[in-house]
Amino acid sequence: MAPANKRQKPWMSDVKAFAMDAYKEDPATGQVGLYIDFYLLRPQSHFGTGKNSDKLKPSAPDRPIAKRSMDLTKMTRAVEDALTGIIYRDDSQVVTQNITKHYSLKPGAMVMIVFGEAG
């Protein structure tokens, strides 16, 4: 299955590279927990103009919920797939997840894997 988003493939390559750099063991064979905090850039339209260009508009949402913001499930699947064969043998080993998305000044993700996670 090919990613629908053209930015997904480079993102997955970056996740793989970071995972290979951080984890030097053989892929886990048991259950794992996956905890991800995604950080997305806030759109310029959330800020005022002129002297208020550094201030959020009162109508700006706290979290990324607009249709143009990435779907949390698809973002998670991309990370799960990128970690397959590096952190664990198959993403079916993920038995617990806690996934969030936030606005940030710098886009990215914080990923934590807990081995032997029982839920």
Image (cartoon, rainbow, N blue to C red):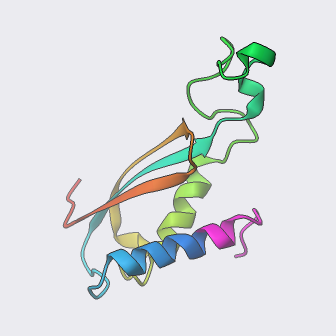
Task: Please say if 42 is above or below 6.
Answer: above
- Image location (x, y in percent) of residue 24: 29, 84
Question: Which of the pair 52/96 is nearer the observer?
Answer: 52
Instruction: Judge from the rendering whether residue 9 lies leftward or rightward of residue 30; answer left or right.
Output: right
Q: How many marks?
A: 0
What residue lies at 34% left-to-right and 75% top-to-bottom? 22
Q: Image quarter for residue 10?
A: bottom right
What residue lies at 70% left-to-right and 76% top-to-bottom? 1
Give the magenta range. Answer: 1-11
Question: Which of the pair 94/103 is nearer the observer?
Answer: 103
Question: Which of the pair 51/60 is nearer the observer?
Answer: 51
- Image location (x, y in percent) of residue 39: 53, 45
Task: Please say if 27 is above or below 30.
Answer: below
Task: Please say if 9 is above or below 86.
Answer: above
- Image location (x, y in percent) of residue 108: 53, 54
Question: Which of the pair 12/106 is nearer the observer?
Answer: 106
Q: Main secondary structure of the magenta part?
A: loop
Q: Residue furthest top?
A: 58
What residue lies at 58% left-to-right and 56% top-to-bottom? 75
Q: Is residue 16 visible?
A: yes
Q: Is residue 87 visible?
A: no
Instruction: Judge from the rendering whether residue 90 lies leftward or rightward of residue 114; answer left or right.
Output: right
Q: Image quarter for residue 2?
A: bottom right
- Image location (x, y in percent) of residue 92: 40, 71
Q: Residue furthest front?
A: 51
For residue 39: magenta?
no
Q: Image quarter for residue 50?
A: top right
For residue 2: magenta?
yes
What residue lies at 67% left-to-right and 66% top-to-bottom? 8
